[in-house]
Amino acid sequence: QVQLVESGGGLVQPGGSLRLSCAASGRTFSMYAMGWFRQAPGKEREFVAAISRSEVSGPYGDSVKGRFTISRDNAKNTVYLQMNSLKPEDTAVYYCAADENRSWLGVPGIGSSEYDYWGQGTQVTVSS
């Protein structure tokens, strides 16, 4: 089992940047493919980005392609989400998630049901 704790959220102006972090503890971090999802008020949870166990980034959600970058450091048990050119529609609670059933080179899934463990979320608000 793994425990996930997100950090780095906050208030940022449109066009600004934020970097989210998700620290994992428990079972060996490299055993998990990792993903980021987000959920805005009144909307369903949306896939943002994912990264394989072997640190290959992708896929990305269509709404964030070219603006967000996911990365991970298996030595630090942490996955990151660098968010640039932020827009008001990026406002949401951002969650990291872990998939324990993906092979080392397997492409991570984009469905929330494919992930087994979730963090508590961190709020990102994009507003002037």
Image (cartoon, rainbow, N blue to C red):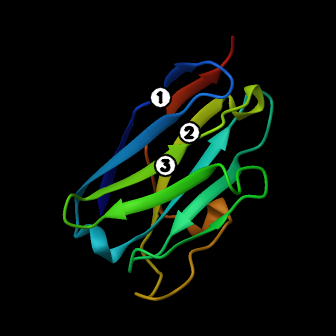
Location of mark 2 (residue): 94
Q: Which label sits in the foreground, 1 or 2?
A: 1
In this picture, residue 15 sits left or right of residue 73: right
Q: Name the quadrant containing residue 83.
A: top right
Q: Left of 7 or right of it: where is 77?
A: left
What residue is drawn where x is 71% and y is 50%? 64
On the rendered image, what quadrant is the C terminus found in? top right
Give the amino acid type for the residue marked by disc 2 in the picture: Tyr
Tag 1 near tag 2, CB within 8 Å? yes
User: In which quadrant will I find the N terminus?
Assistant: bottom left
**First in residue order: circle 3 vs circle 1:** 1
Dot 1: few (<14), some (14–19), or many (≥20) neighbours within 10 Å? some
User: Decide: marks 2, 3 in contact (CB < 8 A)?
Assistant: yes
Quadrant for residue 103, please give it: bottom left
Which numbered marker is on residue 81?
3
Q: Are marks 3 and 1 in contact (CB under 8 Å)?
A: no
Question: Which residue position holds label 1?
Answer: 9
Q: Nearer the viewer, residue 53 or 102?
A: 53
